[in-house]
């Protein structure tokens, strides 16, 4: 069986990062995530592009989308170096979805949904490892030692855009820009809607059986 090509899509806080980490361990595939790639290059100079702001940081701190040309390039490069993958955080609008069509096929599209209230609780309580990017939550997914990553011993921090105001804007951007992408995928054979409200373990059980069904 070829390594699976998985797209995981859903609003900020739906559990994409958490479940991607399970997919990587289970299937030995690459995690391709535009959010992490951009965070590692926050101060990249964009002044040569005809964009409103000069760095990814300026967009991300406000919770707005970074220009398509920047993220398209990141994904194109990462995909050409990957065998199987889980793509997380892209595409986020219909133009990016069209770009993706020209780059690769997909075996399964996992669409995670969670209510807005729950998303706000998850995002404002999220902590991430400053070294390896692993996700935790102050209530729902605590590390063994407070403030310390179980995986690598790194320091757990709160993201700049996990504040109440940025979170509200990110959820609005999702509704306006990303929901149409999901509507466009719905009805394809690869598309599967996943209830993201259960425990991380419940959601994982559903995801694993879905991926196995679509790749065997
Ligand atoms: P979350 O996990 O909360 O959904 P991400 O880490 O995926 O958030 O993304 C953080 C920020 O990075 C976004 O709010 C946006 O500013 C930028 N970003 C990430 N992916 C994309 C993308 N595909 N297109 C445009 N901007 C993006
Ligand atoms: P995304 O990548 O979609 O933005 P994350 O995987 O980072 O989402 O999850 C957002 C926050 O919610 C994190 O703090 C994570 O620990 C927590 N979380 C993830 N899945 C669940 C779940 N099923 N139930 C409760 N909290 C969760
Ligand atoms: Zn870590």
Image (cartoon, grey):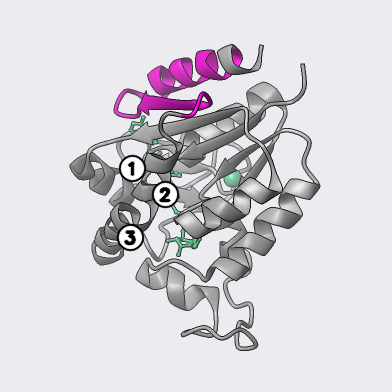
Q: Secondary structure at mark 1?
A: loop
- x and y percentages locating residue 73 in the rendered image: 68, 63
Residue at x-position 45% and y-position 78%? 58
User: Do the residues under discs 1 and 2 have CB atoms within 8 angstroms?
Assistant: yes
User: Do the residues under discs 1 and 3 have CB atoms within 8 angstroms?
Assistant: no
Q: Is residue 198 left or right of residue 73?
A: left
- x and y percentages locating residue 52 in the rendered image: 46, 85
Residue 188 is labelled as: none
Q: Would you call the spot at circle 1 few (<14 residues within 10 Å), some (14-19), or many (20 or more)?
A: some
Which quadrant holds the N terminus?
Answer: top right
Q: Say whether mark 3 is within 8 Å of ligand 1.
A: yes
> What is the spatial separation of the Cα atoms under label 3 and label 2, in whole angstroms?
22 Å
The magenta stretch spans which residues?
A: 188-212
Residue at the spot of label 2: 127
Q: Based on the displayed image, in which of its 4 quarters is residue 158 positioned? A: bottom left
Residue at the spot of label 3: 173
Q: Secondary structure at mark 2?
A: strand
Residue 138 is labelled as: 1
Residue 209 belongs to the span the image colors magenta: yes
Residue 20 belongs to the span the image colors magenta: no
Residue at x-position 42% and y-position 49%? 127
Number of marks in the rendered image:
3
Q: Say whether mark 1 is within 8 Å of ligand 2.
A: yes
């Amino acid at each position: 069986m070829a390594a699976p090509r998985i797209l995981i899509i859903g609003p900020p806080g739906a559990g994409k990062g958490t479940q991607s980490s399970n997919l990587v361990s289970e299937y030995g595939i690459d995690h391709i995530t535009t959010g992490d790639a951009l965070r590692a290059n926050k101060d990249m100079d964009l002044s040569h592009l005809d964009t409103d702001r000069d760095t990814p940081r300026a967009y991300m701190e406000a919770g707005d989308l970074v220009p398509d040309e920047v993220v398209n390039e990141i994904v194109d490069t990462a995909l050409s170096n990957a065998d199987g993958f889980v793509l997380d955080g892209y595409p986020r609008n219909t133009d990016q979805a069209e770009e993706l069509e020209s780059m690769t096929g997909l075996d399964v599209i996992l669409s995670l949904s969670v209510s807005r209230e729950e998303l706000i609780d998850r995002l404002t309580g999220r902590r991430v490892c400053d070294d390896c990017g692993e996700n935790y939550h102050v209530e729902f997914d605590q590390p063994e030692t407070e403030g310390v990553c179980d995986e690598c011993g790194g320091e757990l921090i709160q993201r700049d855009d996990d504040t109440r105001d940025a979170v509200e804007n990110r959820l609005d951007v999702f509704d306006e820009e990303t929901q149409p992408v999901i509507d466009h995928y719905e009805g394809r054979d690869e598309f599967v809607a996943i209830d993201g409200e259960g425990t991380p373990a419940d959601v994982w059980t559903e995801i694993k059986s879905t991926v196995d069904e679509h790749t065997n």
